[in-house]
Image (cartoon, rainbow, N blue to C red):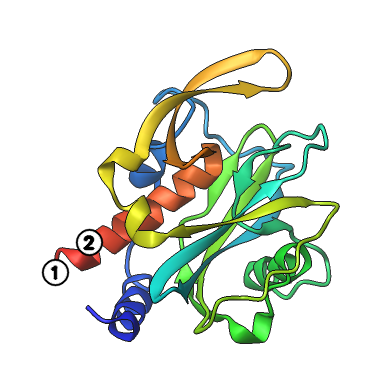
Amino acid sequence: MGEQNFIEALKKRLKQPLPGLEAQRQMSSRPPSGNFEIRPDHRKSGVLALLYPYHEILHLAFMKRTEDGRVHSGQISFPGGKMETDDRDYIHTALREANEELGIISEQVEVLGQLSPLYIPPSNFLVYPSVGFSRQRPDFQLSEKEVAAVIETPLEYLLKKETVQRVQVTVGHQLRMNVPAFTFGSHIIWGATAMMLNELLTVVRELGSK
């Protein structure tokens, strides 16, 4: 399937019922019986899973957060953040944050659709993931305050079964956890980002099987 045909098929598929919690939980660091109840005082956020061609291969853009002592300090995530009062919706939030964090120009992003919302208990955020496509590789401009590095990962690599491994991560300063994760070189994608990514990859595999 060519790039444009794939993008059109993905856009169409994202309008249909999604794998949702079943795909998300496959990469959850919490036990199957873990509490996913959304607190009434939760905050909303939007993130962007951006696909774009690089060396004629579709890539996804991730960012490594700076070490700032916060809940998700130093972790790898999609660009995104808290929904502000001036944001029209969570898509606007995702595009605004992607611009602020990685310099991605909103007008160059075609929003293909959304993945299932995901609640993150440690930070009390309900995250709304959007999937976007840029016809060209962004000219990344990193926010020094928030972003330590941009991580460009081929989509086809993430689809390989051997990419998923169980690894040990340190949460905070002491707690060590054994979690499922996507591994790319020395990079580890786990937690909420891995859960959202797994839903996207589930959809992509479904398209490839047709």
Could one spot residue 19 in this view of the protein?
A: no
Mark carried by residue 27: none
Classify residue 165 by image quadrant: top left
Q: Report the front residue among 46 and 163.
A: 163
Q: Is residue 44 left or right of residue 134?
A: right
Residue at the location (30% across, 54% down)?
Answer: 202
- Residue 147 visible in rendering: yes
Looking at the image, which is closer to me, 88 or 23? 23
Q: Which class describes the residues within 10 Å of circle 2: few (<14), some (14-19), or many (20+)?
A: few
The answer to whether 77 is drawn above or below residue 16 in the figure is: above
Query: Residue lying furthest right in this view?
Result: 145
* Residue at which label 2 appears: 206
**In front here: 164 or 92?**
164
Seen in the picture, residue 83 relative to 88 is either above or below; the reply is: above
Residue in view at x 32 percent, y 70 percent: 16
| Marks 1 and 2, how far apart at CA | 7 Å
User: Which residue carries the number 1 mark?
Assistant: 210
Tell me, yes or no, whether the two marked residues, 1 and 2, touch with CB atoms within 8 Å: yes
Q: Position of residue 27 (x, y in %)?
A: 41, 37
Q: Residues within 10 Å of mark 1 (few under 14, many from 20)?
A: few
Residue 2 falls in image quadrant? bottom left
Left or right: 168, with 84 as reference point: left
Q: 143 and 88: which one is in front?
A: 143
Name the kind of residue labelled 2 in the image.
Glu
Three-letter amino acid code at the position of disc 1: Lys
The quarter of the displayed image where residue 23 is located? top left
Q: Position of residue 186 (x, y in %)?
A: 52, 38
